[in-house]
Each structure stands twice: as structure tokens, then as C-alpha cells.
Image (tube, helix red, strand yellow):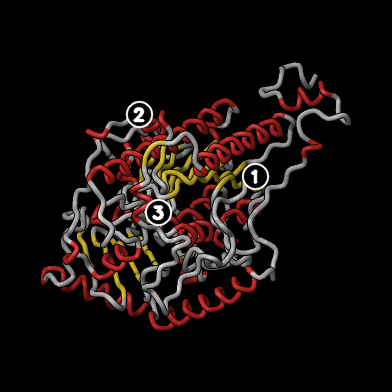
């Protein structure tokens, strides 16, 4: 089988519910819709941890966060953990990362041959939670309701600056790969282009904001009264100030409108990449995958942002299109850890090449429209606003959520997609609830995991204090750039440079 190119276009904090491809009646996402129309849409795809860095480390490694100690946004992603970038490079691919991956630690490559932008978030231990003081806010970086209140219009933000750079650098890299191929130095490529939108702050440029109007923006569908919130949701609301900083309907509507505007902005980047693949002649050779690291509650259930396992936070879009991908939708529960074994399958690798066990399974059968006996996604949350690990098991139509400090939660997604009714105590679901509880007790040692998490938090806080005092050079990634070798310089013939950069080359260029 010919090795296809692999292009992953990744959003940050994009709930599939807010895209046209997944049925939103207002969202304008024509490019994602077009990919879904010619490929496979996964309707029950989940992140493995509803927070940026842990989710991305699981995505890169194919392993659950408890296996690789990727607990929170200040957990080190250890250089010893193999990633799909390592494996694909071993299989002959050119590998590149453009954009955000929130790598924490001194290794800022993790198997990518090229990394062409810096990251948008810090690479050190500054954002370490403290489970021995779980109610204390880290005001320097915790979300709060001021972010919602500040939503609206702007011509420039740090997020717009960043994503425009990510797209430009990635498209230039694709043209460079095409130039090399035209000169006989071709190889299949695996490019990850990872954007920060539609992550808060919810601020959009006018051309995207004006795609929508206030009167078409729906308000959150289900918001329990504060006294009816489950304990974990109540802690989240306290942590982000949602329980005591009121929002007006106008503020909620403005934030949701800006979010949809930024979803459309992200969608435009999908269109730019498809156009670049067409212009370089690689569209028919490329598997295009659109996904996200987690979703956004956006006011549903009275919650904002992520950090929980309700559908708007834990589910992600997953759309694949390209050679060998069937047209349709897949209903099986899947998750981001499944992408590493999928990529190895696509690249012609074998399970024997794995350096460490992985927790995912290949999605190749589902991509090809075949049956898959597995219908399961596992999630773990071990970060701020909890003092105990939170476990999710989505299997078939049921979702079970476990936390040692809280009552169990069980939802039947098929009959209750808004998760309005916790059926953990419903006699009709008694056996399922008991089976899930037994499974959690057997698969996770909650006390040992909690002790390990607290130990790493103490260690990282001590190290961060030393780093702040000057004990280490910053780990933030600085892309390599040698201007003396770019464009036209005195040591090169400008006509040779012009031929090198022109694509497609003139037919007689190499004669």
C-alpha cells in the first residue's frame, strides 16, 4: 500500500456541537462540512483529558495520561515517551509541527523533524495545581468570568496573530515539500497544523463576527439551578467564578456569537489547507484529519471552558477524508489515543515497532466503513479544581463518571443527550452502575494515583521556584531561522533561486 500523506488540522477547545458538520443550524463551517461530505465523520469522539496539555500528550503518545504522568497543564511530557511523530519518521515520513502542542519540558520536538513556529503557552512548570489546597485559585492563569464579559469584536488579538502565523508557516512548508518532490527528493509527509481558536478569549475579527447576528444565537439549552449542580460542577463553577459572578443574557449571547465567529475563522484555515494541497497536487494522496484537543461548555449546564466530562467539554470533532476513507459516519465511541495506532496502520507499520504499550486501537476499519467491535472511550482528569482523579468511561450509549470525593454519575447519552438526568441511582441502571464501579476499582488505584499526583506537584513547584530564580534557561521553543539562506543572497544566482521557489516548476526547468 502506498504511504499516504497525513495532515492533521487541530483546533483548540472546539466542541463538535458548534459546527455545521455536526448539525448546528447556524454555524458556518463550509470547509469542514465539505470534508465530512467526502469522508468519515466520527460522532462519538472524545478527548482523553479535557484540558489542553494532557489531552495533547495523550494524542501524541497514544497513551492515557495516568500512564505517562501527564496530569495537568504543567506536567512534563517526558522525552522518553515515543510519539506518532517518532514512529512516522522511522517509517520514512517527513514530519512537521506548526502551532500549538503545549509541550512542557526541555524537549520541544518530541519526534517532529521540523517545528516551524513557537508555541503560544509557556513550557515550564508555572501552571502547577495544588491538590492539597484545591480551593485556591491561581489568579495568574485560572479562567474566570471576566473572559466572558470581555467577549466581542477586535481587529487583532494575540490568538489571531498566532493562528495567522501557524497557517502561513504550514502552507509554506507544504510548498517546500512539493518543491523538494519536484526536484526528486520526495517523501510522504505528516504535518500537524495546530491552532488556538476558538479557545477563549472569545474575540473575533469583523469579517467572522458579521457572519452572525444576535437574534440567531441560541442560549444554553440546559442550565440547572446552582443548588442542583453536582459537587464537581459546583467546584468548577466556584473555580471559574461562575457561581458568584453573574452574567447577563447579552454577555452570554455575545460570547457564544464570538465563539461561532472564531469557529468559522478556524474553518477558513481548513479551506486554505485544502487549497494548498490542490495547488501542490497532493490532495488525492493525503488523509486530512480535523480534530480538537477538547470542547467548550460555552454556558451549557452553567459551565464554561472545559475541565469536565460532559459532552460539550469532553467530545471533539473527528473528521477524516482522503484515499481509502469511506463516506459516512461512525457511531462507535473513539478517542484521541486511537490516532497513533491509526497513523501507524496508514503508514504501513506494525505493532511490533511500538516502544511502549498504547491504550488506543486503530480506527482504520471504521475509516473504511467496516465494523468495529470496540465501542469505548476512556478519560482521566487530574488537574485543577479537584482533589481526586476523575475517571470517565463511555461505552455504548452509557457514560460513567467517577471521583472518590463525589457521588457517581451515569448518563444514557442515547436517550438523554443533554445529560440532564443522572441515572446512577435508578434501579433500571443498577447493574450497569455496579459494573462500572467495579471496573473503575479494578483498573485504577485511586489512592496511589492521587499520592503520585501530589508528589509531582510538590516537585514541580519546587523546580519552578528555582527556575524563576534563574536555575535554567527558558524551555520556550525558538524556531530556527537562518535569514542568510532565504530568498536571494549574494552567494547564490538569483535565477537559480527563482527556479527553486517557483511552483509548479516550468516544464523545461530541468532540461
Q: Which residue is mark 1?
A: 116
Figure check: 69 above or below 329 = below
Residue annotated with mark 2: 210
Residue lying furthest left in this view?
A: 427
Under tag 2, what secondary structure?
loop
**Residue 164 percent coordinates (x, y):** 54, 37
Front: mark 2 or 3: 2
- Residue at the spot x=70%, y=22% of the render? 505
Distance between the alpha carbons at the discs numbered 1 and 3: 24 Å
SS of the residue under disc 3: loop
Instruction: Looking at the image, tell me whether mark 1 or mark 2 is earlier in sequence order.
Output: 1
Position in image of residue 267 (x %, y %): 42, 35
Q: Can residue 326 be spotted in the picture? A: no
Q: Is residue 81 visible?
A: yes
Cβ–Cβ under 8 Å for marks 1 and 3: no
Q: Residues within 10 Å of mark 3 (few under 14, many from 20)?
A: many
Would you call the spot at circle 2 few (<14 residues within 10 Å), some (14-19), or many (20 or more)?
A: some
Residue at 60% across, 53% down: 85
Q: Position of residue 104 (x, y in %)?
A: 57, 62
Name the residue at 53% across, 31% down: 283
Q: Which quadrant of the figure contains the C terminus?
A: top right
The residue lying at 71 percent from left, 34 percent from top is 180
User: Which sits earlier in the primary sequence, circle 1 or circle 3?
Assistant: 1
Mark found first going from the N terminus, 2 or 3: 2
Task: Please tell me whether mark 1 or mark 2 is closer to you in this view.
Answer: 2
On residue 294, which mark appears? 3
All told, the count of numbered labels is 3
Residue 476 found in image quarter: bottom right
Task: Give the structural element (helix, strand or loop) at label 1.
Answer: loop
In depth, the one of 112 and 429 nearer the eye is 112
Percent position (x, y) of residue 94?
65, 45
Amino acid at each position: 500500500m502506498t504511504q499516504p500523506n497525513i495532515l492533521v488540522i487541530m483546533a483548540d477547545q472546539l466542541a463538535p456541537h458548534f459546527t455545521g458538520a455536526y448539525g448546528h443550524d447556524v454555524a458556518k463551517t463550509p470547509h469542514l462540512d465539505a470534508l465530512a461530505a467526502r469522508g468519515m465523520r466520527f460522532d462519538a469522539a472524545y478527548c482523553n483529558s479535557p484540558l489542553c496539555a494532557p489531552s495533547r500528550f495523550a494524542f501524541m503518545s497514544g497513551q492515557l495520561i495516568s500512564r505517562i504522568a501527564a496530569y495537568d497543564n504543567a506536567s512534563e511530557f517526558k522525552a522518553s515517551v515515543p510519539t506518532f511523530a517518532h514512529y512516522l519518521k522511522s517509517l520514512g515520513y517527513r514530519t512537521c509541527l506548526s502551532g500549538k502542542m503545549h509541550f512542557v519540558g526541555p524537549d520541544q520536538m518530541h519526534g517532529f523533524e521540523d517545528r516551524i513556529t513557537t508555541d503560544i503557552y509557556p513550557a515550564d512548570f508555572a501552571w502547577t495545581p495544588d491538590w492539597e489546597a484545591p480551593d485556591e485559585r491561581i489568579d495568574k492563569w485560572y479562567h474566570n468570568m471576566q473572559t466572558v464579559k470581555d467577549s466581542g469584536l477586535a481587529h487583532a488579538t494575540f490568538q489571531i496573530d498566532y493562528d495567522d502565523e501557524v497557517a502561513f508557516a504550514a502552507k509554506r512548508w507544504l510548498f517546500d515539500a512539493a518543491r523538494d518532490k519536484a526536484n526528486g527528493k520526495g517523501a510522504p509527509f505528516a504535518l500537524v497544523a495546530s491552532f488556538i481558536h476558538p479557545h477563549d478569549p472569545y474575540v473575533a475579527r469583523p469579517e467572522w463576527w458579521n457572519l452572525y447576528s444576535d437574534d440567531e444565537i441560541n442560549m444554553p439549552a440546559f442550565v440547572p439551578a446552582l443548588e442542583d449542580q453536582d459537587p464537581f460542577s459546583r467546584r468548577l463553577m466556584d473555580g471559574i467564578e461562575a457561581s458568584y459572578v453573574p452574567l447577563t443574557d447579552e454577555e452570554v449571547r455575545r460570547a457564544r456569537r464570538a465563539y461561532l465567529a472564531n469557529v468559522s475563522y478556524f474553518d477558513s484555515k481548513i479551506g486554505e489547507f485544502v487549497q494548498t494541497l490542490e495547488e501542490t497536487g497532493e490532495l488525492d494522496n493525503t488523509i486530512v484529519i480535523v480534530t480538537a484537543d477538547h470542547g467548550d461548555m460555552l454556558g451549557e449546564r452553567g459551565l464554561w471552558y472545559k475541565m469536565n466530562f460532559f459532552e460539550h467539554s469532553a467530545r471533539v470533532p473527528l473528521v477524516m477524508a482522503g484515499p481509502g476513507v469511506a463516506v459516512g459516519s461512525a457511531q462507535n465511541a473513539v478517542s484521541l489515543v486511537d490516532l497513533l495506532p491509526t497513523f501507524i496502520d496508514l503508514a504501513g507499520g506494525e505493532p511490533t515497532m511500538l516502544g511502549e504499550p498504547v491504550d488506543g486501537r486503530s480506527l482504520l476499519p471504521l475509516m473504511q466503513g467496516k465494523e468495529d467491535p470496540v465501542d469505548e472511550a476512556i478519560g482521566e482528569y487530574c488537574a485543577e479544581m479537584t482533589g481526586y482523579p476523575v475517571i470517565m468511561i463511555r461505552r455504548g450509549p452509557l457514560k460513567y463518571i467517577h471521583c472518590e470525593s463525589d457521588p457517581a454519575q451515569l448518563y444514557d447519552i442515547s436517550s438523554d443527550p443533554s445529560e440532564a438526568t443522572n441515572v446512577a441511582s435508578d434501579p433500571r441502571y443498577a447493574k450497569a452502575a455496579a459494573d462500572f464501579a467495579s471496573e473503575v476499582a479494578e483498573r485504577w488505584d485511586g489512592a496511589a494515583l492521587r499520592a503520585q499526583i501530589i508528589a509531582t506537584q510538590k516537585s514541580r513547584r519546587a523546580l519552578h521556584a528555582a527556575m524563576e530564580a534563574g536555575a535554567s534557561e527558558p524551555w520556550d521553543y525558538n524556531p530556527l531561522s537562518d535569514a542568510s539562506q532565504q530568498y536571494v543572497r549574494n552567494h547564490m544566482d538569483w535565477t537559480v533561486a527563482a527556479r527553486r521557489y517557483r511552483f509548479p516548476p516550468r516544464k523545461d526547468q530541468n532540461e
